[in-house]
Image: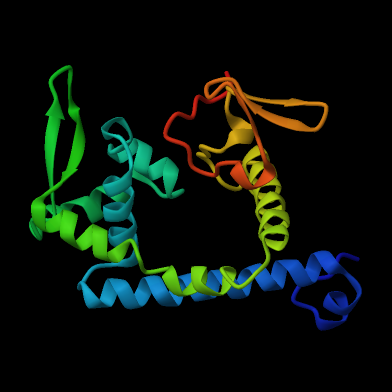
């Protein structure tokens, strides 16, 4: 019989179970911090996430369909959030001339201010990471990248713009290499969200 990772007896016997519970604790911290930020701005957590995403990503990614895949939500849910952001004048939209059902979402001046401030909501999680050694951080990053990659391959999470899913990435005899940058990458240089990402076909 398979036991839950939250079963204390299971946790005490399996490292994997303790890692799962540790990740759940960290995700709880993200939820609390994001919720606090959203309350401060009278927005929902997903509306804050949309503003931050638009602030840092290219225009072709700032469409309802892409955002739905990015956040693993339905188009209807994203559309409802965008309507609120439009009503609050934090975003504007421009209809695609070739497809009137599609539109690109832009931040307004006020939206830029809100997104920039909100983008620091997780800084209190980054601070303790700064106290770890470079080796500890590299090992953690590599483990998380592999976990995300495998969750992506199994369909648990959708869009990923990381090295492991990029056509420019190669692994030669244990050495990471980027064909776009024409250079080797150390494990600490592997990217989790790259603007030049080209999905493997």
Quarter of the image with the C terminus is top right
- Visual colour scheme: rainbow
How far across and down, in percent of the image, does residue 174 sit?
Answer: 80, 32
- Whether residue 119 is situated above or below residue 60 in the rendered picture: below
Q: Which residue is drawn at 87% across and 79% down?
A: 12
How far across and down, in percent of the image, does residue 67 sit?
Answer: 35, 43
Q: In this view, does 136 lie to the left or right of 8?
A: left
Across the whole image, how many numbered discs are drawn on residues? 0
Q: Is residue 29 left or right of residue 119?
A: right
Q: Which of 174 and 14 is in front in this view?
A: 174
Q: Is residue 76 left or right of residue 126?
A: left
Q: Which residue is drawn at 54% across and 44% down?
A: 192
How far across and down, in percent of the image, does residue 96 sit?
Answer: 16, 25
- Whether residue 165 is situated above or below residue 112 in the rendered picture: above
- Whether residue 191 is situated above or below residue 174 in the rendered picture: below
Q: In which quarter of the image is residue 22?
A: bottom right
Quarter of the image with the N terminus is bottom right
How far across and down, in percent of the image, does residue 125 sit?
Answer: 50, 71
Q: Nearer the viewer, residue 83 or 132?
A: 132
Q: In which quarter of the image is residue 51?
A: bottom left
Q: In this view, does 165 lie to the left or right of 96?
A: right
**Residue lying farthest to the bottom in this orientation:** 8
Q: Which residue is drawn at 41% across and 50% down?
A: 73
Q: Residue at x 28, y 38 (%)?
A: 62
């Amino acid at each position: 019989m398979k036991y839950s990772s939250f079963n204390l007896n299971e946790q005490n016997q399996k490292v994997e179970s303790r890692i799962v519970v540790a990740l759940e604790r960290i995700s709880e911290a993200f939820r609390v911090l994001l919720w606090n930020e959203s309350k401060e701005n009278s927005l929902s957590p997903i509306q804050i996430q949309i503003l931050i995403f638009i602030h840092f990503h290219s225009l072709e990614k700032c469409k309802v369909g892409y955002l739905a895949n990015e956040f693993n939500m339905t188009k209807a849910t994203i559309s409802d959030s965008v309507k609120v952001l439009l009503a609050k004048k934090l975003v504007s939209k421009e209809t695609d001339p070739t497809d009137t059902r599609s539109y690109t979402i832009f931040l307004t001046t006020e939206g830029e201010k809100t997104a920039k401030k909100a983008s620091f909501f997780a800084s209190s999680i980054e601070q303790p990471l700064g106290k770890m050694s470079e080796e500890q951080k590299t090992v953690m990053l590599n483990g998380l990248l592999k976990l995300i990659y495998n969750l992506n391959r199994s369909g648990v999470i959708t869009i990923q713009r990381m090295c492991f899913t990029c056509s420019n990435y190669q692994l030669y005899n244990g050495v990471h290499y980027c064909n776009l940058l024409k250079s080797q990458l150390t494990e600490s240089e592997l990217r989790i969200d790259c603007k030049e990402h080209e999905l493997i076909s």
